[in-house]
Image: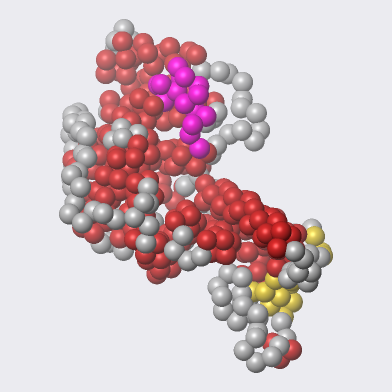
Amino acid sequence: MSFGEVPAYRVQTLNTLAFPKGQVPRCEMTGLPARVQCITPHITLYFVSKECAKQAWYGIMHKIAPLLGPLRTPCLVVGTEEDRAKREYTMEMSKKALVDLCSQEAEKFLVERQYDLAIPGALQAVTFLREIYGDGAIEMIGPFMQLAEAHLGLGRAREAAEVLGRATWTVSKNPDCSNSMKSQLHRNIGKLHLSQNKLDEALAELSHDIYFSSLEMGPEHIETSVGYYHIASVFYAQHKIENALAFYDKVVDIWYRFLLAARRDTNLVDSVSESQLSQAGDMLDHVLRTRAKLLGDTHIATGEAKYTVGLLHLVANNVEKARDAIQAALATYIDHLGPDHPSTKHIQDTHDACPLPKAPPGQVIAFGDDADDADAAGDTLHGHTFGAIDAHFPSQMPRAATQSPIPLVPEGAGL
């Protein structure tokens, strides 16, 4: 078996009888006794199956294999104490650089929704961090969260729960853990509960997420909006539609204000990662579809969501989609408020200022319907299918009142 167009990398069955009893190599991914070996010019890697080897290769190993050989080869020359110190320092810095590379690759695949390919990089980052700092190091929380998100994306609740359990233990061992890390931990636990239909537990965890995110970055920050979005999804699953719409309103309000500010200050755009833009696109597109479904496609709140989606497409350099979304919003505002209303004029000015040339290849960030057609087809989130909503709303139902749903810290929120 060869990988892609590089025949030098091949996988073949491992002869386990060639190893002393109890010394069969372990799989790089699972830790189980290996059954195949991946032979490269730099190092031989061991895996439990050919499928596992292929997943690891395309996920991260093709980039770090040339560096693993020197890192794993024992040094035969003892040298002086100073030489040993320099060698240990070089090894540690090399592993830290590999942690950064592995985490970046895992994050890239998470953004692209290639969850199976995100796992190898996150696992390797955990391995290197354990070698550098030992078990329980706070630096391992980031890769743990990447692993949890990947497993949730693949619908693997058991594996996600295991990873989140390790992350919870790590946080408990580090009282100086940042509020941002605590927020991410509670968010992923909440998403896990949501996927298991444990809606009350999900609501409790997500309230912790919002609390810690608000402490770290503020209740109106775009990162905090993710917690509001997931709480809205829980309320939607509970058929508490007005509550869900109110929290969806909060998500739109936060991103609307941020995107308007970003049009005036381009430095704000540089502060947002590709992952955040992709996630925002998913959230706003889902809010748009939900408002269109419950309030009607021509409702003013649906038009507001279209305009916000259009602004996000502008920031992400999806020019054609931006013009389409803003034009659709403009038609709604003209119909409801008239062409001379200040809000209508504002949208008209934005539409007129949209650039006409297509975005250069490689600079467009995909999100929304193109990135997640399955979500558009049915109301699902991390494997949880929401029940059908039987409520019927009048065509001119007023938009749910915007609120700042910041809960008080629950008892025992030290974690």
- Is 244 contained in the magenta span? no
Image side of residue 394 versus residue 234, left or right: left
Q: Nearer the viewer, residue 134 or 390?
A: 134
Image side of residue 147 versus residue 54, left or right: left
Please say whether residue 229 is visible from this viewpoint.
Answer: no
- Is 261 contained in the magenta span? yes
- Colour style of the rendered protein structure: secondary structure
**Quarter of the figure with the C terminus:** bottom left
Residue lying at 61% horizontally and 70% vertically, measured from the top left: 28
Residue lying at 52% horizontally and 61% vertically, measured from the top left: 133
Report x, y in % for residue 136: 44, 63
Up/down of 124 relative to 285, above or below: below
Q: Quadrant of residue 17?
A: bottom right
Report x, y in % for residue 288: 35, 36
**Quarter of the figure with the N terminus:** bottom right
Report x, y in % for residue 52: 61, 70
Question: What span is in magenta?
Answer: 259-273
Up/down of 414 relative to 354, above or below: below
Secondary structure mostly taken by the magenta-highlighted segment of the chain: helix
